[in-house]
Structure formats: structure tokens, C-alpha cells
Image (cartoon, rainbow, N blue to C red):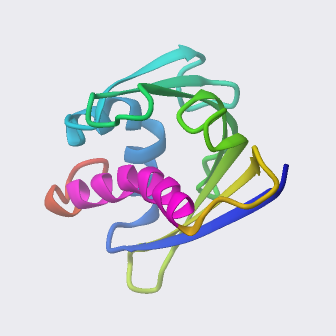
Amino acid sequence: MVSGTILAEHTSAVPADRLWKASFCDGHNLIPKLLPGIISSIDILEGDGAAVGSVKKFNFTDVIKDYSYVKDRVEVMDQENHIVRYSTLEGGVIGVKVKSYSVEISLTSTSEGGCLSKMKIEYESIGDSLLSEEDANDMQQGIFAMVKAIDAHLVENPTAYA
């Protein structure tokens, strides 16, 4: 077992407050509408979905061949500083590519009026090596796809979540 870290960034023209509200406070409602070909629904199993301890189950469509769902628990939800951290409990790449992983996403306002999204994935591999570059890229692209879809929606709908 080896510990690894994946880092990624995404620059947005949308202010941090709006992207935060849409992504992490109402994402369970918005994401299935924006990505219906990938995510069929997001069920809140515990909590309200936006509080520490909340457990959410992301149900995928048949487009995702390797697994049908992923279940996450919110570990940190810092509304003021726009930082969320969650652990994956089961599903997804757990037991297939990694033993465990957690994701932290932070949104920081930029001087241009938008924000910078930073993502950090920390994982424990199953074997004695880090994830391949392809697997690491697939993992971060899959997670950031949701933020990017919400970002595009907010650019197209400037009064949403204002």
C-alpha cells in the first residue's frame, strides 16, 4: 500500500460564493440536471447534504461501466472559507484501484471577480505503487467534471445562486 496525492486547479469567471452555493450547498439537486447522461441521482442518506457528517450517494448511469455508485461523507464544510473535504466510503474506485481516498476542494476569489478551484485527492493504493498517470487523471477529471458543469451553468445563468 502506497499513499498518493493528486492535485488539480480550475479557474472560473464565477464568484466563489455562487460556485460554492451551487456546487456544495445545492449540488445534490443541480448536478443530476446538468449531467443526466452520467449521474442519474444523488441521494442524501444522512444529514442535509451540506453539513459535516452528511452522507451522499451518487448514482451513475450505464455510461460509467466500471461501477454504479459512489458514497461520500462530508468531513469538513467550511462555508466562510469555501473549503469542503469528503471521504469516499464505498463504491467507485474503492477496492478496485484504491483502498481509500478523500477529496478536498477549495474556492478562492480572484482579483478578476471569479475564483480558483483547487482540488487535492489523497489516496491509499491497493498495491505497492501509485496510481498510473491515466488512472489519476481519470479520477480528478471525473470529480472536477461536476464543478466544471456547474461553472458553465452559472456563466450561462448569471442570476442563478446570486
Foreground residue among 125 and 75: 125
Foreground residue among 98 and 112: 98
> Magenta span: helix, strand or loop, mainly?
helix
> Left or right: where does residue 48 sit relative to residue 35?
right
Foreground residue among 91 and 45: 91
| Residue lying at 77% horizontally and 59% vertically, measured from the top left | 129
Q: Quadrant of residue 136?
A: bottom right
The span picked out in magenta is 134-154
Q: Quadrant of residue 67?
A: top left
Is 144 part of what is drawn in magenta? yes
Q: Quadrant of residue 63?
A: top left
| Residue lying at 62% horizontally and 24% vertically, measured from the top left | 54
> Left or right: where does residue 67 sit relative to residue 5?
left
Residue 55 picture location, percent across and down: 60, 23
Farthest left residue?
A: 156
| Residue lying at 73% horizontally and 51% vertically, measured from the top left | 123
Residue 131 picture location, percent across and down: 65, 59
Residue 17 picture location, percent across and down: 45, 57
